[in-house]
Structure formats: C-alpha cells, structure tokens
Image (tube, grey):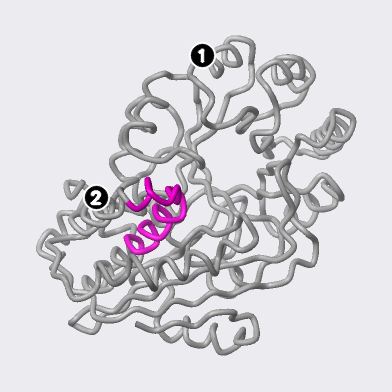
C-alpha cells in the first residue's frame, strides 16, 4: 500500500505513538427524517475521534454509526473500553502496520461477540485519523501525500427521500449539483412516479441514479427492470441483499441494461476482490468509515480501477468522514463521483462544505483533510448541546 505514497513525501516520518484520544458522540435532529427501505433516521448521529501522537500532532477520524439508532454511543464505548486501550502507547512503523495489528487483534472478539461491523468501523475511524496525522506531519493535504494530483472532484446529491423528491432535486440543483440519486423500494407507484418527475426535470448536463437499499428479491428486481430502463439511470444500487451469492447478481446483470452498483456493505479484502473479479458490478462503492479506512481501501480501489469498474465512494454521515472520502477520491483519480447527502445536517455542513460549481467541489490544499484543530474545537463549542458523549483517554 505504501507504494501509493507520493515521491515528494517519501521521507515523511510514518511511525507513530498514540498518546491520547478524544471521542465525541453527537446527534442533530432531522428537519426531515431520512427514509430507507429498512428504516428511518430521526436524527443525524456522528462519532468523531481525535488522536494525538507523541510529537503533538492531532488527527481526525469518523466512525460509521447510522443504524441502529443506538449505534453511535455503542461504538464510542467499544472504542473506549476495548479498541483504544490496545492502540495507546505502542509504536507502529506506519499506518498500515497499525491497521493490520488492530484487525488481527480484534478478529476473535468480532467472532465471539458477532460485532464484525462495529469493530471494523471503529478500526476504520482510527486509521483515517492516523492518515490525517501523517498528512499534517508532512504539512500537506491528505490527497497529495497519497499521490493525488488534482483537488477537484465530481459529486452527486444522495439520500433523496420518496416524499418531496422533486423539490429536493430542485434545492440541490440550486446548490450546484448536477447529479441526483433517489431512494426507491417504497412501492412501484411511488418509485416510478418519482423517477418520472425527476427524469422530466433533468437538463442535458444532469444525471440521475437510484438506490434500492437492498429492498428487493432477485425476482422483484428482474420484474421491475424493464420499467426502470425507461429512465436515464446511471446506475441501480443494491437492488438485492448485499451478501447475495454471485449467481444472484449474475441473473440481474444479464437482465439489466442499467449499470449495477454496490459496495458499502462489503467488508474485507477477500469479499471485495471476489466482487471485483466476478464482474457483475459496474460501480463499486466502499465506505472508508464502515471498513478499512485509508489503509484497507487503497489496495481495493487500485483493483477496482484496474478492473475497469468505477470507484464511487459511499458516504452518508458527518463532515470528517466526507472530507476524508473526498481526499481519497481525489488521490486515486478515475471518473468517480463523491456521494454527498442531500439532507440538511449541521454535523456535516459546519465541518466540510466546499462550494459546488457545476457539480464539482475543490478541496483545496489545506493540510490533512482540511479541518484544523481550531476548526474542530470551534465546531464542538457551537454545537455543544448536540454532544451526547465526550470521552478523553
């Protein structure tokens, strides 16, 4: 993985000794609940992690925690009681060494507890914070230290609800978006009516895609594909359960003229490489806050791009994870789009909200992920009433 390190920064010190950690859990009420085929979010949670090294450099990471609703506080306790004590006061050669140690050390606990996802998500957030530290130590942007050349990335507006979808598209269009992803899986009448309205509103330079959130069976997907094909969809995301066998995806692929997308619910090198090699997915969407962080995902993304598929990072959380995802997309290149939640969320917007121009953002050249220590402190002060847990180790 370290062959991705930019030659200009080949001499940066990659070793680290974590001496302190700060975990913050926050919740922001939703103005409009976010609906999916498997549940509704009535508030926007976030678990933010700030690590500090022995040389006084601090880095920020985020842990995925959207579902179930109690997940944020649970992951903070996992960090506090199990995972961070194994990290602190050990010297690691580089971020990948740390990621591999934590992954190996907690493999048995994940099996014993059945907590594969939460443990992987905590380790992913740690890894992202460590890479922010490495970039800050080098006094450069994260995307630049991992060999990125361009700071501009394409985006799309995600999380568009089945209620008021056309109005949401209009609001996002006014903000500068040119691509829009609608949530479906709420009944054919609702889904097709919303798709028709959005398709009719698109201008020549705009795109639409759709996400079923694992809501259908193979049979249902094949049944509705001809109706979906009437719309200019860039992709159909997770029509079936993500863990379905390759044969199920092959049936859909053979029946579909619409590119297929998935990846946010894939974990581990073997599972990702199987998904890549089978070739059913045209768009692959790892989420760095759900599994792998930077260290785990860089080799996966390299394989995605080599295979000819598109890398479009999944993300639906707060500002730290989104900033890190943007830097990773900028670093690896390709023609992928950055997913940005269309729903209002101050835990995202007040940390990372670059201006949109013709569907693109410029993440600039600020050090690390672009969120300074002072910015983070100011953010916590402004939103102090949204903090549900504040833990320092």
Q: Horizontal and vertical percent for residue 386?
A: 64, 80
Q: Horizontal and vertical percent for residue 167?
A: 85, 52
Labels 1 and 2: the sequence-earlier one = 2
Q: Can the viewer see residue 151 in this picture?
A: no
Q: Can the viewer see residue 249 in this picture?
A: yes
Considering depth in this image, is 164 or 64 the residue closer to the camera?
A: 64
Q: Horizontal and vertical percent for residue 254?
A: 58, 10
| Residue 104, label in figure | 2
**Res. 134 image quadrant:** bottom left
Q: Residues within 10 Å of mark 2 (few under 14, many from 20)?
A: few
**Residue sitting at 70 percent across and 20 percent down?**
221
Say how many tags the image has. Answer: 2
Considering depth in this image, is 345 or 179 the residue closer to the camera?
A: 345
Q: Is residue 148 above or below residue 262?
A: below
Q: Confirm or deny contact between disc 1 and disc 2 (CB under 8 A).
A: no
Q: In the rendered structure, which segment of residues is drawn in magenta?
A: 109-128
Eye-nearest disc, 1 or 2? 2
| Residue 247, label in figure | 1
Describe the element under mark 2 as helix, strand or loop.
Answer: helix
Q: Main secondary structure of the magenta part?
A: helix
**Residue sitting at 43 percent across and 86 percent down?**
374
Q: Horizontal and vertical percent for residue 215?
A: 70, 33
Measured Cα–Cα span from mark 1 to mark 2: 31 Å
Q: Is residue 290 above or below residue 212?
A: below
Placement of the C terminus among the 4 image quadrants: bottom left
**Residue sitting at 40 percent across and 83 percent down?**
373
**Res. 145 image quadrant:** bottom left
Residue 81 among those drawn in magenta:
no
């Amino acid at each position: 993985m370290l062959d991705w390190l930019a030659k200009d920064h080949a001499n940066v010190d990659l070793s680290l000794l974590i001496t302190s950690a700060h975990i913050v859990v926050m919740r922001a009420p939703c103005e409009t609940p976010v609906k999916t085929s498997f549940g509704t979010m009535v508030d926007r949670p976030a678990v933010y992690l700030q690590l500090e090294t022995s040389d006084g450099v601090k880095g920020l990471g985020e842990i995925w925690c959207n579902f179930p609703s109690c997940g944020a506080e649970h992951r903070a306790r996992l960090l506090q009681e199990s995972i961070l004590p194994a990290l602190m006061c050990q010297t690691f050669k580089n971020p990948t060494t740390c990621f591999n140690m934590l992954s190996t050390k907690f493999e048995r606990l994940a099996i014993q507890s059945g907590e594969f996802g939460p443990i992987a998500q905590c380790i992913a957030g740690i890894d992202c914070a460590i890479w922010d530290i490495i970039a800050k130590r080098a006094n450069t942007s994260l995307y630049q230290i991992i060999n990125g050349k361009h700071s501009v990335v394409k985006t799309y507006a995600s999380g568009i609800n089945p209620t008021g979808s056309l109005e949401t598209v209009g609001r996002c269009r006014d903000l500068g978006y040119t691509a829009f992803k609608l949530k479906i899986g709420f009944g054919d009448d609702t889904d097709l009516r919303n798709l028709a309205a959005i398709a009719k509103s698109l201008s020549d330079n705009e795109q639409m895609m759709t996400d079923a959130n694992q809501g259908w069976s193979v049979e249902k997907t094949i049944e509705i594909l001809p109706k979906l094909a009437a719309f200019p969809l860039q992709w159909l995301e997770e029509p079936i359960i993500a863990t379905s066998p390759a044969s199920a995806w092959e049936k859909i692929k053979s029946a579909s003229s619409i590119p297929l997308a998935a990846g946010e619910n894939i974990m581990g090198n073997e599972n990702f490489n199987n998904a890549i090699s089978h070739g059913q997915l045209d768009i692959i969407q790892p989420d760095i806050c759900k599994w792998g962080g930077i260290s785990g995902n860089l080799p996966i993304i390299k394989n995605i791009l080599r295979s000819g598929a598109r890398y479009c990072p999944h993300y639906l959380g707060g500002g730290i994870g989104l900033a890190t995802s943007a830097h990773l997309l900028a670093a690896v290149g390709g023609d992928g789009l950055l997913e940005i939640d269309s729903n209002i969320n101050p835990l995202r917007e007040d940390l990372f909200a670059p201006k949109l121009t013709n569907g693109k953002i410029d993440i600039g050249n600020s050090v690390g992920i672009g969120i300074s220590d002072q910015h983070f402190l100011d953010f916590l002060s402004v939103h102090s009433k949204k903090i549900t847990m504040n833990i320092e180790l």
